Image (spheres, rainbow, N blue to C red):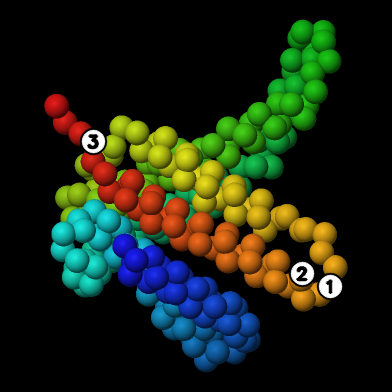
Amino acid sequence: MRRLWLLQAIGNALLFWCAFVWLGIRDSKALQLTETAVLGLLILVPWLWLQNGTLAYCGDRSQGLWPAFRKSLRTLVLFTVITVVFVVLFWALGKLEAPLAKAGQQTASWLTFHLRKPIKPVTWARSYLAILWGVRWILLPVLALPIAAGAALHGARGMWRRASSIFWLEYLIALGIGFYVPSVLMGWVPKLSGTTAQVLSLVLRFGVAYALVITTWIAVAFFSSETKSRP
């Protein structure tokens, strides 16, 4: 587990730094565009392998860390397809924010007209957006993660296994620890005098937030790999 945590922490940090540098590459010419695409794949593929290998290891720790990562190369293409589908669905749902906000205003207007009672449009708009947030950040991951975990370990035949009955609860707890707490830490700006103290505070808060994210992701990988207990 220590080696897996270090691999995740160092691997993600290195690949994210490469991605940051990659964003600054010029792509105004055809050759530069080709180089950008190739370098992008050289960053994306190792990142996908890192996550796929983590899910494969969490699904069967008896095989050892490095054998699990070597074995996960066989399921990398399928895992990539699942990841792309998830990202596309997540992106498409995000595009519904503006229409749903407008629908909330229309609903409030309709209710005001028929009930003869003022209804605040912002209330319905926020309600619709809250439902959309739940679908994007809770329902979609809860459905996709067990499928990705099964595919990482067993390929296509492992995609449709039944996840643990409490996975949704485990995921909600992990979401709070790995998403909400780090966002609070990074948004918190303590009143400190001096540039050095402020920089140290930022580095410390970022370090704690990053450690929480990595730890939570590994926990989610284990939770995703759990199967439903049978009588």
User: x%, y% of residue 33?
Assistant: 54, 84
Q: How far apart are marks 3 and 1 (CA)?
A: 54 Å
Q: Quadrant of residue 52?
A: bottom left
Q: How far apart are marks 2 and 1 (CA)?
A: 7 Å
> In the figure, is residue 101 to the left or right of 69?
right
Q: Mark 3 points at which residue?
A: 228
- Asked if the residue under mark 2 is in contact with the one under mark 3, i.e. CB atoms within 8 Å, the reply is no
The quarter of the displayed image where residue 69 is located: bottom left
Judge the density around disc 3: few (<14), some (14-19), many (≥20) Cα neighbours within 10 Å. few
Identify which amino acid the numbered label 2 is placed on.
Gln
Query: Amino acid under label 3?
Result: Lys
Counting residues from the N terminus, which is met first, the one under dot 3 or under dot 2? 2
Q: Distance between the residues labelled 3 and 2?
A: 48 Å
Contact, mark 2 vs mark 1 (Cβ under 8 Å):
yes
Instruction: Give the label on residue 198, or none.
Output: 2
How crowded is the residue under tag 2: few (<14 C-alpha within 10 Å), some, or many (20+)?
Answer: some
Residue at x 26%, y 44% (from the top left corner): 226
Q: Point out the tag, 3 or 1, that comes first from the N-terminus.
A: 1
Can residue 85 be seen here? The reply is: no
Mark 3 or 1: the one toward you: 1
Residue at which label 1 appears: 194
